[in-house]
Image (cartoon, helix red, strand yellow):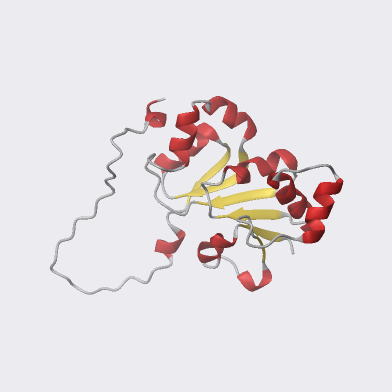
Amino acid sequence: NNILIFDQQSEKIISKIFNIKKINFLKTRKEEINLIILIITFLKFQFRYFDYLINYINYTQAKVVITSIDNDQRFYRIKSKLSVITIFFQNGQRTGAGDIFEIFDKKNKINSFKKKYSVDLMCVFNTMTAKLYKKIIRGEAFVAGSILNNNTKIFKTINKNLVFISLFRSYGKVLKIIEK
């Protein structure tokens, strides 16, 4: 198949966009290991799991690799190894506490990441998140909003209750990457 989904956990979001019955999944959490690909990887004297993933993608001859697991740094390295189109869909709110931006900020090597990490298309929730991603990953950003929320039916009932929803997390840190 021309499309390969990187990580089985992407199914929930990707199924809102594509007919997943016609799409293959690469199970990146070691739920399944393809023995043939593993042998090919070892015969090439490659012993890292990332090498296995690259060999799997190469073996399937996928033209497009898609994920909604935008916290997986391995996905951003695929373009440096293969000439496939890579697309990710943001799957959750990014606040800089316990997510990909905090990981990059802790390593404090943002410029070196941008040299290694790239995708063809980043489908993100908003322009602020797009700017943050563009600081650490090369690629085009497209503000798509939340795929799951975009597919939720809106009920037009009048409710006279007031609800406050907060994204507060008690990490006590301010996202430093925004300031840079």
Q: Residue at x 61, y 42 (%)?
A: 76
> Residue 149, located in which quarter of the rendered image?
bottom left
| Foreground pick, 42 / 118 | 42
Please name the residue shown 77% across and 50% down the image.
55
Q: Which residue: 13% across, 68% down?
A: 160
Q: Which quarter of the picture shows residue 132?
A: top left
The residue positioned 51% from the left and 62% from the top of the image is 13
From the top left corner, tell me how far across and down residue 130 is, in percent.
46, 41
Percent position of residue 12, x then y? 51, 65
Q: Position of residue 141 (x, y in %)?
A: 52, 43
Depth check: give the residue in front, 41 or 151: 41
Tell me the quarter of the image containing the C terminus.
top left
Residue 163, image x, y percentages: 18, 60
Q: Is residue 75 above or below residue 132?
A: below
Q: Is residue 141 above or below residue 149?
A: above
Quadrant placement of the N terminus: bottom right
On the rendered structure, is 10 left or right of 97?
A: right
